């Protein structure tokens, strides 16, 4: 009830305060309010409104236990992290922790978000996370890793080489879930590295049917390119055979001839690809069908290509946009291979309800498919289209008729007559288009068509479309000798209207005048002079230019020189007829089905399909050695099996966590861990708050009072003061050397403290070791041997069975240092050697950060005085005077949490020791003249004084 | 792959944007608006538009442009197919895909889009999986079938998953399908009544010319299923006459190999409604045209008027009744009004859209429906030179016009006895009569 009331109340506030409300809601303790706020923020993002100022308030909820809230925070984070890089870093450790979660869903989503945050500083962390996820047991996490590869690559292309290693590893993956995603990564990062494909080629072909549909498209496209570089052309045979057939027929020594020409044998791998993609023509996904169709077009022997026809025609039943793309590809195909689509001619008949671009493409295809045999059917169909209400479409049809007429000479006259009839059409666009097409047709047919020309001369009075007028004028000029009577009259008419004509008409008028002047100067001399004078003062410089040129050419004078002698031959030269071609003629230079093909221009990132190699590359590169038994994963080979095995892997993350928590008996010592649970939850309601207080204060408070307090807390929804373990502030990890390559006989080991809660025991500090094999042989059985001293417990990492040369691996271990800076010594063993090593912890790494309110801090500090307090006055580097550097410096030395402070000059930090959970408080009070007072309060006095020294060093450095 | 998605209303209002990589300014949509300005209707906007820095691939449906922004080479069909899946998912979740329903459910829309794409590459597009991760807006509701619009399937598909709190619409588990080789089915399905229904729906696509002769005719069919079976059933569906099927496409659940070898459909079905297969009937078979149409539409040269006379009657009906007959005519622009009388059904003429709709209903053998009367044209305007085409809609229950028959349905892998049913329907697809 409370939440609804407050929400509706908040709703009433004015718009300018809106973000303030959202902030308030996000900072409240009620999860429902936070969720409501996040939903509204997502609504803002969806509308494209700026919500970046809420970043600090939102990012606090990144570790929420409520999955929906968390997901919405992720959405926000991914959207704004790029703009708020510093703040985004606060969330990184949450993801790092989640990457180690036993639930694969959580691991995967952490990787997804971590890799989507486009903050360059975390590139090394992303790289590490991807490497680890690529070897994850869950194929779902590995799939996510494949996606993350592309994200990291676009963030930092310099990681290319490392990413290729991961791609290589994932390409070997046998899961159908991973295949599509890793091939996608391959295509984005290193499409030229086809050597990585060889060994996986057959596996990919065999997996293909079971890969999800989107992955299929990507794999098929990639394999098309691959095949064009690795196999011999299956088309070569036809060509060779044609050339030789005649010779072979007459040649008596047929045997010898055959031996010479080496009959073409298709590589079995080439066949494998064709065979395994064929069933996908039956996919419901149109993109898959198109991908297979283009594969067959580019790779299959000519006689096999036509199996894709039916499927492509089927796609024409799909959505309008699908039709558009498919028709474009059919248009390109039908130019080269009429036969493929001719039986389906009627499928390309235009319906009155088709969209304009669909109609145009269908016309294009019908024109491409026209042959002497079917032209009469097509023309009859065209006649219907010419009458269409869509005049633009009617005009396109006329162009199509023109093309059919030039391609098939038998029908040219029929078409011409038909078009002349259309000249009396009432619609001007149709008539204009007719004139243009007739002009082109007459040019190809220089026989006597003076009737048509006369007819067109009459049209000039009524037609206003400039292109058509220009065409008529050109026709009359060109064939003026065939219509000697009417040509001068036409010139007279246009001379009258010259000034009001469009530019192209003016140009053709000038042409007509010049041509008539040369052939019939007696009748037209004055008219021509008149028109040339008009042209001389035209506004358009093209027309003025042309006028000047023509005058010099045709009107002889002293200056005109030799050229005017040839004026007639220049102007009235016989001109080659225009070729009416398909707009799709050269489209086949692009791979079918690509964006570039659709645009008829190279799209960025387009990968050329190479020509077939002339000499077959080595086939054996694709041979795979006998299958090694897969130790880690079991892959279901057929659909439908092993489902339950996977089902078992799935854990309900929140519920299972809760369940575990309840079942596990809670010993007193467990307090730290239960704190951490409470803090990672956003469920900061009274119950968890008071629970943690119960833990910390249990010694001092009597049982009854405690219970009463819990009850009141629950009733009043008042968060009790509490100290909670918080997530560490992100600092770039500092790596230390554990074993040098020289002393380790090739084995180099470094370690760092990831500052994450240790998975093995809450008393342990987690340490990550990175082992690198610098030898030229693999190292085997790397493990941790004897360890000491007795006070320090070590959780060993699992034995590494084999480490390949140049390879490196990161493992984590846990060490309970017992809150001392004593070094942990242990032996690092390989199969042959043993090395004694020791890890000396920095005191700051023995802590885990906590948060508390300022009041709590002061209260706790007040209890830790006397010998528990150590302090020193330091000279502070001038740049550290502001709050940011102080915080950063402290945090880089010690894993502490920042405590909010009401005074600008005082900075407070709090932490607990990992092993015993003792509170460690530190404060920096900035004073005059770059001095500061540094105080550390803790009951672990030794640790406190060491920490004080280290903080002093860090802060006084510049 | 897909960089960003914008949803744009026909009026040019961008009401949703989502970016999977870095943010692209919404001003990129101006290129779409420019193309829209040139096109006479939204349908005519080209699906692929190149801009200086990006490529826009868009899909127009349900009065919304789904605009995907692309930066590098990608198969355009890949994007188009995906955008249609997005629209179908919205339809499935909200009952309708409209600007209003998307705005009302913007959080769910965002959550869906987040799951459907990772870094612009499709992640989960199966309705079954998505519903396990993100619950539809109301808990118990009748889900309108994605594919058929729900008219074909008799039972209401209730989302019967018991869920804890109503406030959260995000599921806590990773859908089981995501991890298995059967991504379309969730595990642990349980029904008290186990039933499997199949609808064989055939559509006749035809163009008849003025005289009633068939210019072009073919039959396209689909088999839509509503399967509500517990556990992990493995079904086999066989036909009496599979040879009729010329070209087929399947839901990913169908095993290609079995079809190629034995001509049976063998599959583990998704839970709920789905389209099992679509097919095309062998072109050699003559298509029975169930109705005849006699029409006479003419416009007079003088007097700005015209006449219209249409008669429809049953032809080859195989003894079944033809129902839901509707004739739609898109009149030329100059037709101002129509004054028509009919002896059956109702006729309406919308002078704004210039669409004449004659809703006839059932066709009887005895009485032949007829529509006639006069058309008034805009005075002074020239007579239209093309007569309008008639689009015919009809439906025949309990008949697959191709003669396709389901033989039997067998179930393996589960012990219970399911209730099975097959229904046949014939409809008119793109059925046009030129006049």
Image (cartoon, coloured by chain):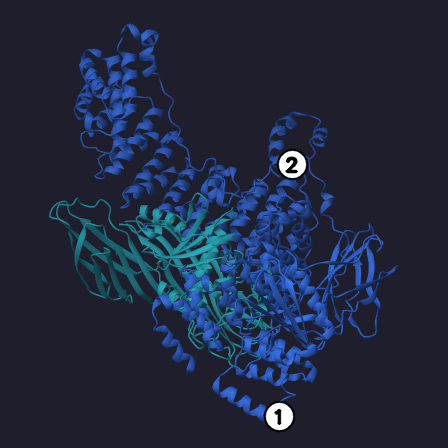
Query: Residue A563: image x %, image y %?
Result: 34, 9
Which quadrant of the rendered structure holds the N terminus of chain A?
bottom left
Which quadrant of the rendered structure holds the C terminus of chain A?
bottom right
State which tag comes first along the sequence, 2 or 1: 2
Residue pointed to by mark 1:
A702
- Chain in blue, by letter, is A
Query: Residue A136: image x %, image y %?
Result: 68, 63
Numbered disc 2: secondary structure: loop
Numbered disc 1: secondary structure: loop
Front one among B52 and A85? A85
Q: Is residue A428 left or right of residue A410?
A: left
User: Quarter-wise, where is residue A822 in the image?
Assistant: bottom right
Task: Tell me if residue B276 can be seen.
Answer: no
Front one among A443 and A141? A141
For the residues labelled 2 and 1, the Cα–Cα distance comes to 87 Å
Front one among B63 and B253? B63
Residue pointed to by mark 2:
A613
Give the vertical position of A167 relative to B346 (above or below). Answer: above
């Amino acid at each position: 009830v409370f939440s609804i009331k407050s929400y509706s109340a908040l709703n009433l506030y004015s718009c300018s305060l809106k973000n303030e409300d959202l902030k308030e809601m996000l900072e409240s303790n009620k999860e429902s309010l936070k969720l409501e706020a996040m939903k509204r923020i997502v609504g803002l993002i969806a509308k494209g409104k700026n919500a970046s100022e809420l970043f600090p308030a939102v990012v606090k909820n990144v570790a929420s236990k409520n999955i929906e809230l968390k997901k919405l925070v992720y959405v926000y984070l991914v959207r704004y992290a790029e703009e708020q890089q510093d703040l985004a870093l606060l969330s990184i450790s949450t993801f790092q922790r989640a990457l180690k979660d036993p639930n694969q869903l959580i691991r995967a989503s952490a990787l997804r978000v971590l890799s989507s945050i486009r903050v360059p500083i975390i590139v090394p962390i992303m790289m590490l996370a991807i490497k680890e996820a690529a070897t994850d047991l869950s194929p779902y996490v590995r799939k996510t890793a494949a996606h993350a590869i592309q994200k990291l690559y676009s963030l930092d292309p310099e990681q290319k080489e490392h990413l290729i290693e991961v791609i290589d590893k994932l390409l070997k993956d046998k899961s159908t879930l991973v295949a599509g995603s890793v091939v996608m990564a391959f295509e984005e990062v290193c499409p030229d590295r086809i050597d990585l494909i060889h060994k996986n080629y057959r596996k990919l072909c065999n997996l293909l049917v079971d890969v999800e549909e989107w992955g299929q498209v990507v794999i098929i496209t990639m394999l098309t390119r691959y095949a064009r570089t690795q196999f011999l052309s299956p088309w070569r045979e036809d060509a060779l055979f044609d050339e030789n057939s005649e010779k072979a027929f007459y040649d008596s020594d047929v045997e010898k001839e055959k031996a010479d020409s080496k009959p073409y044998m298709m590589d079995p791998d080439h066949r494998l690809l064709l065979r395994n993609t064929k069933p996908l023509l039956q996919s419901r996904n149109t993109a898959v069908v198109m991908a297979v169709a283009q594969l067959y077009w580019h790779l299959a022997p000519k006689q096999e290509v036509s199996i894709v026809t039916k499927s492509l025609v089927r796609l024409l039943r799909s959505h309008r946009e699908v039709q558009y793309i498919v028709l474009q590809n059919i248009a390109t195909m039908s130019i080269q291979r009429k036969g493929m689509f001719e039986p389906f001619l009627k499928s390309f008949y235009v319906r009155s309800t088709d969209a304009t671009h669909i109609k145009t493409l269908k016309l294009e295809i019908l024109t491409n498919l026209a042959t002497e045999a079917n032209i009469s059917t097509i023309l009859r169909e065209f006649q219907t289209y010419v009458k269409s209400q869509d005049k633009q479409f009617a005009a396109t049809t006329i162009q199509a008729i023109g093309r059919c007429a030039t391609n098939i000479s038998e029908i040219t006259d029929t078409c011409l007559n038909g078009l002349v009839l259309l000249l009396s059409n009432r619609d001007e666009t149709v008539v204009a288009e007719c004139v243009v097409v007739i002009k082109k047709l007459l040019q190809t047919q220089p026989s006597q068509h003076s009737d048509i020309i006369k007819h067109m001369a009459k049209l000039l009075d009524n037609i206003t479309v400039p292109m058509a007028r220009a065409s008529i004028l050109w026709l009359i000029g060109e064939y003026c000798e065939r219509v000697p009577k009417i040509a001068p009259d036409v010139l007279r008419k246009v001379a009258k209207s010259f000034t009001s004509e469009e530019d192209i008409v003016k140009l053709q008028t000038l042409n007509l005048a010049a041509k008539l002047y040369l052939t019939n100067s007696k009748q037209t001399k004055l008219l021509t002079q008149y028109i040339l004078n008009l042209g001389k003062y035209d506004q358009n410089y093209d027309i003025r230019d042309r006028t000047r040129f023509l005058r010099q050419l045709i009107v002889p004078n002293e200056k005109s020189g030799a050229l005017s002698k040839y004026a007639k031959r220049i102007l009235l030269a016989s001109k080659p007829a225009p070729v009416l071609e398909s707009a799709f003629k050269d489209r086949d230079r692009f791979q079918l089905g690509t964006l570039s093909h659709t645009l008829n221009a190279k799209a960025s990132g387009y990968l050329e399909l190479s020509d077939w190699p002339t000499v077959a590359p080595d086939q054996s590169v694709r041979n795979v050695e006998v299958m090694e038994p897969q130790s880690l994963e079991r892959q279901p080979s057929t659909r439908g099996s092993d489902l339950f095995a996977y089902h078992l892997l799935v854990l309900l993350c929140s519920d299972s966590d809760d369940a575990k928590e309840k079942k596990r008996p809670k010993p007193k010592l467990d307090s730290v861990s239960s704190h951490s649970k409470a803090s990672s939850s956003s469920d900061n309601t009274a119950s968890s708050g008071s629970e943690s207080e119960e833990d910390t204060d249990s010694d001092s408070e009597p049982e009854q009072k405690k219970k009463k307090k819990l009850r009141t807390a629950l009733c009043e929804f008042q968060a009790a003061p509490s100290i909670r373990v918080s997530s560490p502030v992100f600092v770039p990890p500092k790596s230390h050397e554990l074993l040098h390559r020289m002393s380790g006989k090739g084995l180099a080991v470094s370690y760092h403290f990831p500052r994450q809660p240790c998975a093995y025991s809450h008393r342990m500090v987690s340490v990550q070791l990175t082992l690198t094999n610098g030898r030229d042989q693999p190292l085997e059985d790397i493990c941790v041997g004897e360890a000491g001293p007795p006070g320090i417990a070590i959780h060993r990492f699992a034995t590494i069975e084999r480490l390949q040369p140049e390879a490196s691996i990161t493992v984590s271990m846990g060490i309970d240092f017992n809150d001392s800076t004593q070094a942990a010594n242990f032996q690092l063993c390989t199969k042959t050697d043993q090395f004694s090593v020791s890890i000396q912890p920095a005191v700051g790494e023995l802590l885990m950060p906590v948060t508390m309110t300022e009041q709590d801090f002061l209260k706790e500090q007040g209890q830790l005085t006397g010998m528990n307090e150590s302090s020193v006055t330091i000279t502070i580097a001038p740049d550290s005077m502001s709050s940011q550097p102080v915080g950063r410096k402290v945090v880089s030395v010690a894993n502490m949490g920042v405590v909010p402070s009401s005074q600008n000059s005082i900075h407070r930090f709090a932490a607990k020791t990992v092993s015993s959970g003792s509170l460690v408080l530190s404060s920096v009070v900035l004073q005059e003249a770059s001095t500061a007072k540094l105080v550390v309060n803790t009951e672990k006095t030794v640790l406190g004084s060491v920490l004080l020294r280290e903080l002093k060093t860090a802060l006084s450095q510049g | 792959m897909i960089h960003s998605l914008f949803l744009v209303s026909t009026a040019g209002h961008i009401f949703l944007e989502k970016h999977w990589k870095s943010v692209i300014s919404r001003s990129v949509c101006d290129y779409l608006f420019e193309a829209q300005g040139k096109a006479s209707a939204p349908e005519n906007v080209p699906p692929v538009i190149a801009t200086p820095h990006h490529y826009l691939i868009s899909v127009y449906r349900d009065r919304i442009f789904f605009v995907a922004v692309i930066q590098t080479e990608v198969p355009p069909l890949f994007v188009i197919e995906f955008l249609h899946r997005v629209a179908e998912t919205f339809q499935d979740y909200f009952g309708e895909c409209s600007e209003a329903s998307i705005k009302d459910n913007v959080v769910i829309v965002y959550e869906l889009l987040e799951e459907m794409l990772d870094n612009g590459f499709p992640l989960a597009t199966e309705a079954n999986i998505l519903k396990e991760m993100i619950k539809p807006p109301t808990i118990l509701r009748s889900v309108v079938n994605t594919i058929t619009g729900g008219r074909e399937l008799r039972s209401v598909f209730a989302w019967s998953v018991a869920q804890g709190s109503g406030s959260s619409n995000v599921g806590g588990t990773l859908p089981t399908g995501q991890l298995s080789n059967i991504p379309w089915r969730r595990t642990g399905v349980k029904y008290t009544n186990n039933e499997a229904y199949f609808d064989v729906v055939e559509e006749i696509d035809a163009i008849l010319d003025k005289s009633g002769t068939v210019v072009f005719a073919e039959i396209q069919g689909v088999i839509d299923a509503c399967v509500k079976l517990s556990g992990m059933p493995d079904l086999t569906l066989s036909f009496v006459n599979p040879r009729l099927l010329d070209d087929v496409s399947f839901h990913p659940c169908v095993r290609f190999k079995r079809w190629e070898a034995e001509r049976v459909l063998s599959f583990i079905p998704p839970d709920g409604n789905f389209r099992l297969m679509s097919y095309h009937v062998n072109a050699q078979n003559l298509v029975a045209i169930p109705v005849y149409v006699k029409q006479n539409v003419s416009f007079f040269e003088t007097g700005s008027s015209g006449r219209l006379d249409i008669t429809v009657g049953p032809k080859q009906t195989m003894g079944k009744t033809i129902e839901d007959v509707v004739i739609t005519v898109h009149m030329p622009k100059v037709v101002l009004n129509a004054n028509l009388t009919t002896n059956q059904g109702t006729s309406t003429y919308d002078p704004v859209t210039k669409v004449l709709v004659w809703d006839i209903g059932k066709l009887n053998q005895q009485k032949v429906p007829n529509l006639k009367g006069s058309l008034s044209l805009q005075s002074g305007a020239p007579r239209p030179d093309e007569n309008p085409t008639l689009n015919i809609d009809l439906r025949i229950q309990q008949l697959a016009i191709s003669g396709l028959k389901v033989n039997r349905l067998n179930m393996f892998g589960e012990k219970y006895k399911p209730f099975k049913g097959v229904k046949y329907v014939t409809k008119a697809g793109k059925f046009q009569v030129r006049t």
